[in-house]
Image (tube, helix red, strand yellow):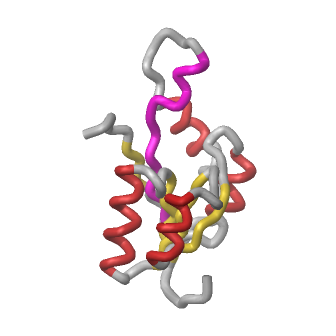
Amino acid sequence: MSSDKKIIAVIGSTGTQGGSVVRSLIADGTFAVRAITRKVNSEAAQKVKAAGAEVVVADLEDVESLKKAFKGAYGVFGVTGERFNHLNLGVYSPGLTAFCLLDCKDMPFEHSEGCRSSLNYV
């Protein structure tokens, strides 16, 4: 992505909540948007790309992929949810995904804050 704008990386960019953030950021125009998804060739990812976002692959269970996706980003919007219920922990655990995000705390972000959201289908 060739732009002088600061980059906001958006996790969950092809979903309802993250997609709304992507659309809002693109419409505002202040930041360049890096849409993070596990499936860069999906129809949803291609729509995000066509709207003006850079689309990159990363997985919340793979810290190294997140570090690559976050490289050069000014900030991150992270959506977590029920994805880890397959671990049979007996509890709803969006925090596991958040822990993976926290493992990336040593990333060289220009901005030291991020936004994490875990609202369920509202």
Displayed quadrant of residue 40: bottom right
Q: Quick check: is 62 in the magenta stretch?
A: no
Q: Quick check: is 77 in the magenta stretch?
A: yes
**Looking at the image, is 114 positioned above or below residue 93?**
below
* Place of residue 31 in the rendered image (x, y in percent of width and height, measured from the top left): 43, 78
* Place of residue 54 in the rendered image (x, y in percent of width and height, measured from the top left): 57, 73
Q: Residue furthest left?
A: 122
Residue at x-position 57% and y-position 12%: 88
- Quadrant (top left/top right/bottom left/bottom right) for the C terminus: top left
Identify the magenta region.
75-87
Residue at x-position 65% and y-position 46%: 59
Q: Nearer the viewer, residue 59 or 101?
A: 59
* Place of residue 81 in the rendered image (x, y in percent of width and height, measured from the top left): 44, 35
**Looking at the image, is 6 positioned above or below residue 116?**
below
Q: Nearer the viewer, residue 61 or 95?
A: 61
Displayed quadrant of residue 26: bottom left
What is the number of callouts on the image?
0
Residue at x-position 48% and y-position 67%: 47
- Quadrant (top left/top right/bottom left/bottom right) for the N terminus: bottom right
Residue at x-position 48% and y-position 60%: 10
